[in-house]
Structure formats: structure tokens, C-alpha cells
Image (cartoon, grey):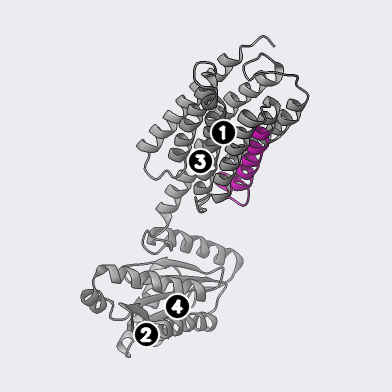
Amino acid sequence: MGLDTRTLIVTGVLSATLLGAISLLFAGMQSGTRAIGKWGAAMIVLAAGLTGLALRGAIPDFLSVVIANAFILAAFVLALRSLRVLRGADSGDALGWSLVATGSVLLLTFFQYLPSYRMRVAVMSLLLGILFVRSVLAVGGAVPAECARSFRFTQYVFGVMAALMLARGVGAIFEGRADMLTPGVLRSAAYLMYAGFITAATLGVMWMEIQNLELELIRSARIDALTGVLNRGTFLEEFGREVSRSEREATVFSLAIFDLDHFKRLNDRYGHPVGDQVLKSVVDTMRLTIRRHDLLGRYGGEEFALLMPNTGKDTALRVAERIRREIDLKGIEIGGKRVDLTVSGGVATFQLDGHDWDSLLIAADNALYAAKNAGRNQIVAAGPALV
């Protein structure tokens, strides 16, 4: 192949530098990014390593062989870290850095003490192959359907690169005496791989990051930022869907409204940060108590609404009572001291107590106020006597 190896390496340097800079710029301009900035830093480190290779003959061989290749290994450890961060995993990677250390020692051995170009190629190919396989595993696994295509694309890119690196390592065994810059099919293909991989993988990471950001934007529009449950607008949408389903299938559902007892008093005494902690704690308890198909939303400041599909009043009362009891038993810890925490609730059933959101909410609210007036920390069912 009549391609100059040094020129191919420089092409990789330019690709890594340009795409690394674009990644860092994107991360700086787009708040909420988690992985792309770290990926950009990895590409800059990769560019430094490839630059060392390209300067072979112009700088000491120790720098262009051992140090430059160590930088390349480090770059892909950093790249793996960015993928792990994107998946919400711990960014620490003791194994990855141990591979860099091991590779550096082996490269030094086969450069200084047992000089062998083929062994250096085999070492680098094996270690890079391991890092790429680990990247495939990091990207793999279950992902939201909205992000599946970007994750699978990036996984395939790393998978193909892992296979190619293995092939390169095997091919190096059959090479004659050669130097890194000596023209040859395998060497030319290897550096073409780098350039193509850098571009494809960067696009994949950007695609994953963008889809994650889009998913978070959609989620933030539907979810209450403090508690993580449905916000009022989304809860009303779900209520409308349940009404349509109930009328279509002739089923019933129930609505429960919960209000924290004496929340204002607690908020004034301990401060708003503690008040936020209380709301989160209540939601955590509710989530552990409700059934999988129930829908929980934040209706107001300290009010929560629970939509219970296919649920009559008796069952809804039992679910609401279980929530009340669990919150009462758990309380809340403030400054190392347990503080009592209770809720009151009202339960209303569709068709029986109301035929739309307004009428059903009024029925549930009337029941809630009855629970408050009766001494709080109890659940009351809507009925004719409360209207």
C-alpha cells in the first residue's frame, strides 16, 4: 500500500484534536452534559500520544515508543470513563489504570531490554482490545427505548475496533523485521482504523449524550423536580387517559389526595431545606407502599395525588391507609432526632363520587378536609354525607 505511515498518523492527530476540541466546546456550551466533555479530554490525550508516534526520529525513541503508547492507552481508559459516567456508573477505573501501568512496563521491556517491534505491537493490540471490549460492556445493557439506537451504534463501533485490534496483533506475528514508520499494509490499516474510529466513536458518544439530554428534557417537563413524582400537569394527563380507558372498558378507578399534617409548622421551625427533605422522605415511603401500576403525583406544595387504576373504594382505602400507617411509623429524622410525621387523606372513586376531574377532586378534597377536622392522621372515604 503506497500510503505514508507518518502522514496517516498525522491524520489521526488532526482528527483526535479537532473532534476533542469540538467535544469540549459542546460540553461547555450545553449544560447538563456528563460524558462528552470527558470524551473530549480523552481525545486530546489520544492526540498527544499519536503526536509522539508521528515525531519518531525527531524526538528520543523512548518518548515516541514508550511514553506515546502509554498516552494512547491512557486516552482509551479516559474514554471508557466517559462511557461509564454516561451510564451513571462509578467513573473510577483501577483496572484500566493497571492496564496502562502494565502496558508501560511491557513496552519498556520490549524497547530497552528485549527489543522487539512485533512484541510491542502485540502488547498494544492486546491491551487496546481489552479496553475496547470493556467499552462494549460499559455501553451494553438495558437502555431507554428512546436511546437504544445511539447506544447500539456506539457499542458496534467499539466491538468492530476490538476485533480489528485483535487481528492486528495476530498479523504482527507474521510481519518481518520492521519499524513503526516502515510502509506496510497492516501499519497503514492500523492508522486508518484510528482515524475512522475516532470519528465514528465521537459521533456515537455525541449521539448518546444528545439523546440522553432530550430524554431528560422530556422527563423534566413531566416530573416534579424536587420529589421525582409526576407533576400536576402530567398527573392530569394521566387522569384523562384513565377516564377514557375506564369509560371504554367499563372499569372503575380511585383517586386519593394526601396532605402532610402541620407541614407549615414544621417548615417554619426547621427551615425550607428540612421541609424539602420531609417531602422527599414521604415520597420515598409512598413509592415503597403503593402498587406497581398506581400513579403518584405532586398536586400542590405538600399535597400528593394517587391514581389507582382498576381499583374500587374498599381496596383504595386499604392502599391509602397503608400509606398513612407507614409514614406514621417511619416519621422523619432531623438533627439525629426522630420527629413525628403524619398525613391525612381522602379517597374518591370514579363514577361513584364523580364523573370528571373536577367533581372527583372535590369529592376527595371533601374527604380530606373531613379527615383533618376529625383530628388528622387518618383516611376518610368520600360519600354523600361529605358532599
In this rendering, the answer to whether 276 lies above or below 201 is below
Amino acid found under the numbered disc labelled 1: Ala
Image-quadrant location for residue 387:
bottom left
* Between discs 3 and 2, the one toward the N terminus: 3
In this rendering, the answer to whether 151 lies above or below 328 is above
* Between discs 1 and 3, the one toward the N terminus: 3
Instruction: Provide the secondary structure element on which disc 4 rests.
Output: strand
* Between discs 2 and 4, the one toward the N terminus: 4
Foreground residue among 162 and 35: 162
Cα distance between the residues tagged 2 and 1 = 63 Å
In this rendering, the answer to whether 385 lies above or below 308 is below
Q: Which residue is mark 2?
A: 386
- Between disc 4 and disc 3, the foreground one is 3
- Between disc 1 and disc 3, the foreground one is 3
Foreground residue among 259 and 325: 325
Do we see residue 35 in this rendering?
yes
Q: Which residue is mark 1?
A: 201
Decide if residue 261 is on the left or right side of residue 170.
left
Q: What range is drawn magenta here?
A: 123-147
- Between disc 2 and disc 1, the foreground one is 1
Mark seen at residue 348: 4
Q: Which residue is mark 3?
A: 78
Instruction: Provide the secondary structure element on which disc 3 rests.
Output: helix
User: Who's the residue at 73% across and 26% down the image?
Assistant: 172
Which class describes the residues within 10 Å of circle 2: few (<14), some (14-19), or many (20+)?
some
